[in-house]
């Protein structure tokens, strides 16, 4: 019987970013609009689309060997699972998302203590209750089925909502009072599956490639040719992932440099490299960076 690893992929807000990251890692995932069973170009992976909110429960129960979900939903469900890797990506970018307490701009609520006796709506009921208990505050917490931002102040005094940029909260005339939890995407495994040698190895390899794709997301490769007279100066100023690769060119007195740098510094460093004498500067995208 062929080995299979049952893995849950998040349906919803994380779906597109997850599929894109898996593609960079070497896994092509095709999702039909009418099916919850994606096609993956690895016969040893059996995928299933599951909402991130439910993922950790199914992994804990062994219905899935592994899954991709948020740290927030693992905590919300109180799931006892193996956290294989921290996957630093979200719906819109590479930064952690936040669960925040938000209130209308003109609300009297200025701090967590002001939530005493209030009515709060959220999808993360358990997280919110734990947060209030930590601060010794008593308030009524109700589950919100969606459109939570529009419920304050007409229906509730405050909300606890997930945000990446805060733009949706601002658009609904809400301000942030406090952060309940910062959350990143996690690759998790069932404890029994993790004890299985084949499944663990398969999941470790999957994790390695996925983390390599994430590491490459904000980096680019940079190649250039430099004359020998300025080689030392350019190497001193060039930020690199490790040490740049330097090799002699067929033309006497010239060297080729190949390195990996943060994409955010390219626009500043390329003009400087050119000014110092570098030629044939090439920037190229990366699929994976394995440390």
Image (tube, grey):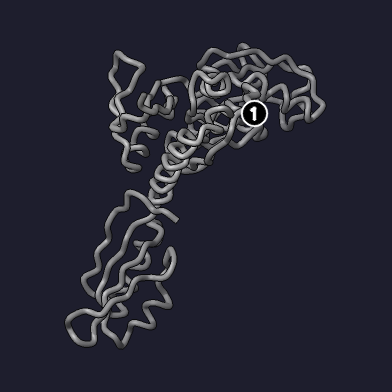
Q: Nearer the viewer, residue 150 or 60?
A: 60
Q: According to the image, label 1 marks what residue? A: 101
Looking at the image, can residue 174 be seen? no
Residue ID at (78%, 17%): 117
Residue 102 position (above or below residue 120): below
Q: Secondary structure under badge 1? A: strand
Q: Label 1 crowding class (10 Å Cα cut-off): few <14, some 14-19, many 20+?
A: many
- Rendered image quadrant of residue 259: bottom left
Quarter holding the N terminus? top left
Residue ID at (48%, 33%): 167
Q: Nearer the viewer, residue 107 or 150?
A: 150
Percent of width and height locating residue 156: 65, 15
Percent of width and height locating residue 53: 53, 21
Relative placement, left or right, of 101 versus 49 is: right
Residue ID at (32%, 52%): 286
Relative placement, left or right, of 77 versus 111 is: left
User: Please, which residue is most extreme toward the right here?
Assistant: 136
- Rendered image quadrant of residue 120: top right
User: Please, which residue is most extreme toward the front here?
Assistant: 1
Q: Nearer the viewer, residue 152 or 215?
A: 215
Looking at the image, can residue 237 be seen? yes
Percent of width and height locating residue 272: 34, 73
Quarter holding the C terminus? bottom left
Residue 148 position (above or below residue 217): above
Residue 34 position (above or below residue 221): above
Percent of width and height locating residue 134: 78, 30
Relative placement, left or right, of 41 versus 138 is: left
Q: Nearer the viewer, residue 2 or 205?
A: 2
State how many labels appear.
1
């Amino acid at each position: 019987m062929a080995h299979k690893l049952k893995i849950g992929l998040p349906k919803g807000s994380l779906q597109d970013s997850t599929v894109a990251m898996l593609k960079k890692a070497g896994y092509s995932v095709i999702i039909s609009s009418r099916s919850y069973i994606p096609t993956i170009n690895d016969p040893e992976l059996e995928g299933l689309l599951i909402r991130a909110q439910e993922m950790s429960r199914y992994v804990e129960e062994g219905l899935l060997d592994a899954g991709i979900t948020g740290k927030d939903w693992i905590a919300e469900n109180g799931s006892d699972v193996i956290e294989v890797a921290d996957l630093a990506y979200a719906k819109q970018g590479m930064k952690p998302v936040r669960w925040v307490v938000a209130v209308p701009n003109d609300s009297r609520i200025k701090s967590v203590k002001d939530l005493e006796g209030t009515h709060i709506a959220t999808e993360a009921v358990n997280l919110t209750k734990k947060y209030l208990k930590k601060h010794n505050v008593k308030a009524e917490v109700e589950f919100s089925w969606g459109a939570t931002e529009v419920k304050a102040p007409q229906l509730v005094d405050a909300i606890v909502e997930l945000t990446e940029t805060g733009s949706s909260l601002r658009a609904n005339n809400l301000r942030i009072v406090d952060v309940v939890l910062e959350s990143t995407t996690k690759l998790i495994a069932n404890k029994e599956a993790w004890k299985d040698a084949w499944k663990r190895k398969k999941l470790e390899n999957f994790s390695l490639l996925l983390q390599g794709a994430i590491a490459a997301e904000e980096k680019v490769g940079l190649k250039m040719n430099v004359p020998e007279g300025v080689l030392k100066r350019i190497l001193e100023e060039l930020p690199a992932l490790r040490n740049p690769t330097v090799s002699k060119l067929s033309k006497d007195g010239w060297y080729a440099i190949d390195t990996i740098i943060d994409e955010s510094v390219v626009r500043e460093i390329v003009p400087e490299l050119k000014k110092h004498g570098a030629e044939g500067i090439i920037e190229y995208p990366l699929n994976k960076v394995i440390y």
